[in-house]
């Protein structure tokens, strides 16, 4: 599973589970995150969600570029667009906390910024490296 989704007490835990790719997001991860956010929205037993990444190296480094390469021309401007279900999930009345461990880069930083509260570990780093490729963040 690209996203681990656990429920403990009043808290829903959403953990991006792609440590070998520094928790880079691929289409499967986006789909699973969308579903988890909708589940959290509709779950009256969960009052808050914590979003994080597996391991200490990265919260999320954005889109998994290697997944984009085969169809780059077709999807150049569309692949990393946050799906409407994720946007609806992040616009909840329930709070979502980003627990940032390691790198939060590109779309991963945007994901953290979309949360209601961000708590960063001492080793957290933030950036938008896509600007070095001429890509405008957001």
Image (cartoon, rainbow, N blue to C red):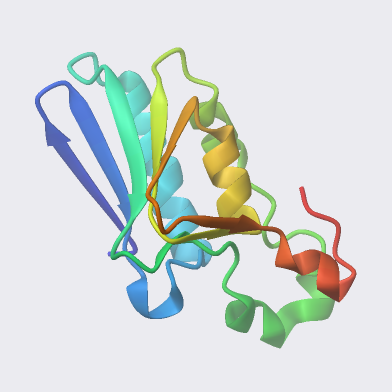
Residue at left offset 76%, top offset 67%: 130
Question: Which residue is situated farthest in the left direction here?
Answer: 9
Asked where in the image residue 119 lies, by quadrant, the reply is top left
Query: As rendered, which of 121 and 70 lies closer to the eye?
Result: 121
Q: Point out residue 16 in the picture as x, y percentages from the top left corner.
A: 36, 57
Q: Point out residue 47 in the picture as x, y percentages from the top left corner.
A: 26, 17
Query: As rendered, which of 69 and 125 lies closer to the eye?
Result: 125
Q: Is residue 67 left or right of residue 130?
A: left
Asked where in the image residue 17 lies, by quadrant, the reply is bottom left
Residue at left offset 46%, top offset 55%: 124
The tally of labels here is: 0
Above or below, 38 relative to 13: above
Question: Which residue is situated farthest in the right direction here?
Answer: 134
Query: As rendered, which of 74 and 6 lies closer to the eye?
Result: 6
Q: Is residue 34 left or right of residue 84?
A: left
Above or below, 99 relative to 101: above
Quadrant where the N terminus sits is bottom left
Asked where in the image residue 62 lies, by quadrant, the reply is bottom right
Q: Point out residue 105 in the picture as x, y percentages from the top left corner.
A: 60, 60
Q: Point out residue 68 in the picture as x, y percentages from the top left corner.
A: 67, 77
Question: Which residue is situated farthest in the front direction here?
Answer: 122
Residue at left offset 36%, top offset 70%: 18
Above or below, 67 relative to 17: below
């Amino acid at each position: 599973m690209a996203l681990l989704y656990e429920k403990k007490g009043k808290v829903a835990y959403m953990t991006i589970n792609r440590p070998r790719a520094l928790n880079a997001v691929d289409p499967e991860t986006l789909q699973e995150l969308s579903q988890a956010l909708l589940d959290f929205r509709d779950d009256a037993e969960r009052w808050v969600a914590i979003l994080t990444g597996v391991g200490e190296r990265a919260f999320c480094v954005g889109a998994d570029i290697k997944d984009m390469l085969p169809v780059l021309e077709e999807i150049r401007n569309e692949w990393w667009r946050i799906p409407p279900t994720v946007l609806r999930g992040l616009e909840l009345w329930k709070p979502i906390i980003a627990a940032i461990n390691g790198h939060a880069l590109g779309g991963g930083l945007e994901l953290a910024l979309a949360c209601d509260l961000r708590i960063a570990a001492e080793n957290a780093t933030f950036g938008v490296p896509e600007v070095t490729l001429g890509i405008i963040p957001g």
